[in-house]
Image: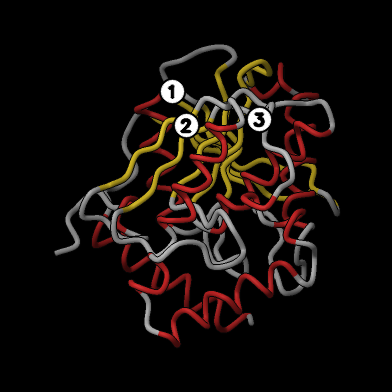
């Protein structure tokens, strides 16, 4: 697993150099230690340098198929820094635990513990606890959506959730998966989802299959036209809307699963 993760990291960094811009000036970046579900975790904070005081804050969960990815990826640094500068939001990227060593619910437990820690230390970390949210891309978006459900259930609702190229269900939803993936690729995606779920009920691990969606944080859902996961993401947006949750859905025309995070065209 270690060799595979190193290879994924190297490929991610090569693609980041090709398709994203360097970390912009005007962003303060530092490493933190944040509480996790099984002990302290590393985190990386991105904060607009021009702003003093408490800021709206989002805990950000990287992608990687639930089994890979890290906050140390060049892609993570570049995009989190760019988004913090553009939005005026403090972004705290969390090094959550990975499957198969730590399958569901460990990554969700990590995010829940991190949010509680940030609330407790809000003054010292410049966090506006009233505007604290969760977000992630790809597999991280699944974890983020499930974390938002958990936060609601424990009476600690969030201010917002941002779900980018979201695998909303740990099962096939709609036609986009079959239309845009070869059979072997589809089987690979299903294996990754099964590795993360580790036999847990879909109602617990799969956001779309949760029994109740009312009372969740307002959601920004970013999908891509040619993403095999698109139909699941749009189904989740529809489900949240029916539950009375404010939703903004954006579908990137001409984009695939990876390209919404690129600054430059892929073609």
Task: Say whether marks 1 and 2 touch (CB < 8 Å).
Answer: yes
Snapshot colouring:
secondary structure
| Residue drawn at x 47%, y 79% as measured from the top left | 186
Q: How far apart are marks 2 and 3 (CA)?
A: 31 Å
Task: Name the outermost residue toward the top.
Answer: 53
Lower sequence index among marks 1 and 2: 2
Q: In which quarter of the image is residue 105?
A: bottom right
**Element under disc 2:** strand
Lower sequence index among marks 1 and 3: 1
| Residue drawn at x 53%, y 34% as measured from the top left | 91
- On the image, the x and y values in percent for residue 247 come to 48, 30
**Element under disc 1:** loop
Q: Which mark is residue 207?
A: none
Q: Distance between the residues labelled 1 and 3?
A: 31 Å
| Residue drawn at x 52%, y 28% as measured from the top left | 90
Q: From this view, report whether residue 95 is shown above or below residue 192.
A: above
**Circle nearer the viewer, 2 or 3:** 3
Q: Residue 28 carries which label?
A: 2
Task: Name the outermost residue toward the left.
Answer: 267
Q: Quadrant of residue 68?
A: bottom right
- On the image, the x and y values in percent for residue 225 come to 29, 54
């Amino acid at each position: 697993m270690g060799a595979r993760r190193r290879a994924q990291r190297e490929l991610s960094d090569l693609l980041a150099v090709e398709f994203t811009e360097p970390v912009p000036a005007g962003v303060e970046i530092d490493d933190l230690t944040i509480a996790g579900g099984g002990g302290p975790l590393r985190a990386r904070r991105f904060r607009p340098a021009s702003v003093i005081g408490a800021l709206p804050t989002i805990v950000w969960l990287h992608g990687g198929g639930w089994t890979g990815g890290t906050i140390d990826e060049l892609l993570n640094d570049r995009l989190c820094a760019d988004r913090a500068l553009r939005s005026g939001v403090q972004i705290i990227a969390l090094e959550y635990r990975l499957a198969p060593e730590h399958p569901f619910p460990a990554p969700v437990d990590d995010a829940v513990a991190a949010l509680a820690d940030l609330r407790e230390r809000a003054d010292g970390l410049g966090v506006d606890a009233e505007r604290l949210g969760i977000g992630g891309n790809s597999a991280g978006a699944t974890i983020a959506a499930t974390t938002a459900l958990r936060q609601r259930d424990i009476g600690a609702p969030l201010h917002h959730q941002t779900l980018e190229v979201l695998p909303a269900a740990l099962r096939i939803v709609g036609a986009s998966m079959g239309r845009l993936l070869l059979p072997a690729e589809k089987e690979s995606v299903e294996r990754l989802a099964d590795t993360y779920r580790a036999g847990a009920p879909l109602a617990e691990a799969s956001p779309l299959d949760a029994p109740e969606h009312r009372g969740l944080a307002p959601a920004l859902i970013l999908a891509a036209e040619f993403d095999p996961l698109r139909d699941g993401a749009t189904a989740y947006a529809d489900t949240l809307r029916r539950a009375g949750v404010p939703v903004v859905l954006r579908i990137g025309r001409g984009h695939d699963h990876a390209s919404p995070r690129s600054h430059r065209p892929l073609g």
